[in-house]
Image (cartoon, rainbow, N blue to C red):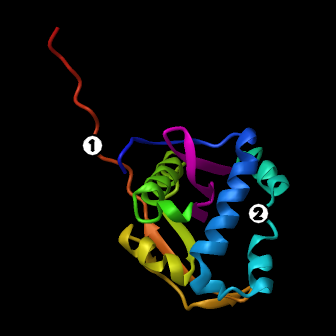
Amino acid sequence: MDAPLNICQATPADAGIISRIVERSIRVGCALDHRNDPRTVAAWTHNKTTEHIQSWLTDQRLYLNIALLQDKPVGVAMAAINGKVAFCYVQPKWFRRGAGEALVHDLEGWLIERGARQARLNSTRTSEAFYLHLGYRPCADTFAVAGLHAIPMHKTLVPCLYTQPQNILK
């Protein structure tokens, strides 16, 4: 990335843009998975509306973050307090430029702060290499859901053992 990327917690005002980022990422970036089948795309996106997202944003068990590049949203991700990474979507023109990795690392930090010791997710074929790169590993057989192949993956979360040294010189 040329400019600094800012990852922050999403707010209810972000629901519309989050819905658009998710839908565009699915339609354009995940064509390998849905093969441009309108029924599969509809099944995948039906619960990604602004209304659904607004309800997620008010649920204390969920954390949605958003990646901003020069104050423009380029990606979004969500996790649940139980360790489930629900999704990570990035605008297709920002694929492979660090936004997805930053979003997932932020989710993992949020999970660690809440005592989670493992993150779990169901990857698509499109995102499998991305999650492998981040240290996730397949943990069960692939299964079909809504016309897609889901690859169950997990990663052990390790709280950072390093703390900043205190400046003891006065």
Q: Residue at x 29, y 37 (%)?
A: 163
Q: Residue at x 74, y 75 (%)?
A: 44
Give the x, y percent position of residue 12: 75, 41
Q: Is residue 140 above or below residue 13?
A: below
Q: How many marks?
A: 2
Residue type highlighted by circle 2? Lys
Q: Is residue 160 above or below residue 83?
A: above
Q: Foreground: 143 or 100?
A: 100
Dot 1, how many residues are within 10 Å of its Cα: few (below 14), some (14-19), or many (20+)? few
Q: Horizontally, is 18 left or right of 38 in the view? A: left
Quadrant in the rendering for residue 80 = bottom right
Find the magenta span and give its range. 62-90
Quadrant in the rendering for residue 170 = top left
Q: Horizontally, is 48 left or right of 82 in the view? A: right
Q: Can residue 142 be spotted in the picture?
A: yes
Q: Foreground: 97 or 125?
A: 97
Residue type highlighted by circle 1? Tyr
Disc 1 target residue = 162
Numbered disc 1: secondary structure: loop
Disc 2 target residue = 48
Dot 2, how many residues are within 10 Å of its Cα: few (below 14), some (14-19), or many (20+)? some
Main SS type for the magenta part?
strand
Q: Residue furthest left?
A: 169
Give the x, y percent position of residue 125: 53, 84
Q: Foreground: 131 or 93?
A: 93
Residue 55 got which mark? none
Tags 2 and 1 touching, CB below 8 Å: no
